[in-house]
Image (tube, rainbow, N blue to C red):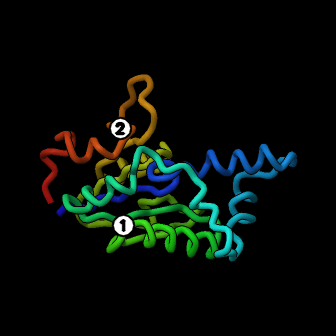
Amino acid sequence: MIKLFIDLDGVLININKFIQEVINNSGVYISIKESFIELCKPFSRNNFLEKCEKINNSFELIKFVKQQYKLIIITHCYSDSEAELKINFIKKKIQDVKCIATSFDKTKNEMLPSAEKSILIDDYVVNVDNWIENGDIEVHFRDKQNGQKYTIIDDLRYLLYTNFLKGIDN
């Protein structure tokens, strides 16, 4: 089975939109990093991830995707408390899935070396570029705009109903 890495932030849920709303509503400018650190301080009573917009029924679709791929959910984190919060959130939403929290100071392909071909679905183009450099398969997740050098999808349904990954052998 092909390893499929799917990014949490920006592919499954829209964390950045929520963080931006928090910043805008606070009336005080703080960086995205500072917002994440503040929101992720150990507090199970107020899990902000539940408040984030789920993108295109992503968690329902994951149930089907994981039948076709060796699924691993990955997420960049600023702190250990953010990593713990995100991993617990993922495990609550998706049963029997591997979760990996990666550090913001390293690219995802540095954190996840693999001897076999694997696929990354990520909304952050730097991660996509680095994945390609490693010789793996990339899929850029975002609203479809101008032609790009990447395979671009805006919905995980493409993993179920198209053959854009056909020909990759494992």
Is 84 left or right of 113, judged from the image as shown?
A: right
Callout 2 amino acid: Ile
Identify residue for label 2: 153
Tell me the element at label 1: loop
Identify residue for label 1: 113
The mark nearer the N terminus, 1 or 2, is 1
Tell me the quadrant of the picture where the C terminus can be found. bottom left
Residue at position x 22%, y 47% in the image: 160
Residue at position x 30%, y 54% in the image: 119
Category of crowding for the residue at label 1, using alpha-carbon neighbours closer than 10 angstroms: few (below 14), some (14–19), many (at least 20)? few
Q: Position of residue 130 (x, y in %)?
A: 43, 50
Q: Position of residue 159 (x, y in %)?
A: 25, 46
Q: Residue furthest right?
A: 28
Relative vertical location of residue 21 with respect to residue 90 in this rendering, above or below = above
Quadrant of the rendered image containing residue 141: top left
* C-alpha span from label 1 to label 2: 24 Å
Callout 1 amino acid: Pro
Is 78 left or right of 170, judged from the image as shown?
A: right
